Amino acid sequence: MYYAIKVLISAILIVAISELSKRSSLLGAILASIPLVSVMAFIWMYVDTKNVEAISKLSISIFWLVIPSLVLFIALPVLLKYFNFYMALIGSITLTIISYYLMIYLLEKFNISL
């Protein structure tokens, strides 16, 4: 039952962002840009474990991985000028995955562990 509640709350937030975006791209973008998934993960981790050290480590890891995730938001509008939506989305996701690997590689080179 607990997992069902977590899934339901998470799903409601996703649907709310999607529906709000249909009415106002600005409000949808503001709501979507808030790191809701991260905040929910912190809350669920705290409720489940009360382990603030693990939450702190997760927060630092998320910080480093936000940087390569921005590639998606740069690549998608560029690729949409040349490809249909699905191809542009696949291309931007692929570039983002490559960026994640590159970021992890660079962090390891500087002895920063995630």
Image (cartoon, rainbow, N blue to C red):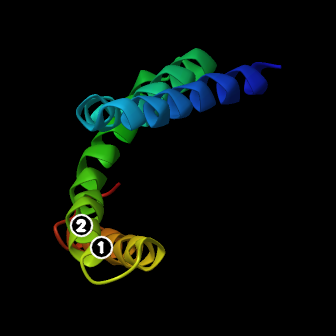
Compared to 24, does 63 lie above or below?
A: below
User: What kind of residue is marked 2?
Assistant: Pro
The residue pinned by badge 2 equals: 77
Q: Is residue 28 above or below residue 104?
A: above
Residue linked to disc 1? 80
| Residue 45 rendering spot, x and y as whole percentages | 54, 26
Quadrant for residue 111, please give it. bottom left
Residue at the bottom extreme?
A: 82
Q: Position of residue 80 (x, y in %)?
A: 30, 73
Is there a contact, CB below 8 Å, between mark 1 and mark 2? yes
What percent of the width, then of the height, locates residue 34? 30, 31
Q: Look at the numbered disc 1 and give the secondary structure of its residue.
A: helix
The residue shown at (58%, 16%) is 47
Q: Quadrant of the N terminus?
A: top right
Locate the C terminus by quadrant.
Answer: bottom left
Query: In the image as oriented, which residue stretches furthest toward the right?
Result: 1
Badge 1: residue crowd in 10 Å (few <14, some 14–19, many ≥20): some
Whether residue 42 is visible here, answered yes or no, is yes
Q: Quadrant of residue 42?
A: top left
Q: Nearer the viewer, residue 79 or 74?
A: 79
Please tell me which residue is depicted at 33% across the width and 33% down the height of the picture: 28
- Disc 1 residue type? Leu
The x and y percentages for residue 11 are: 61, 31
- Rendering quarter of residue 3: top right
Residue at image coords 58%, 29%: 10
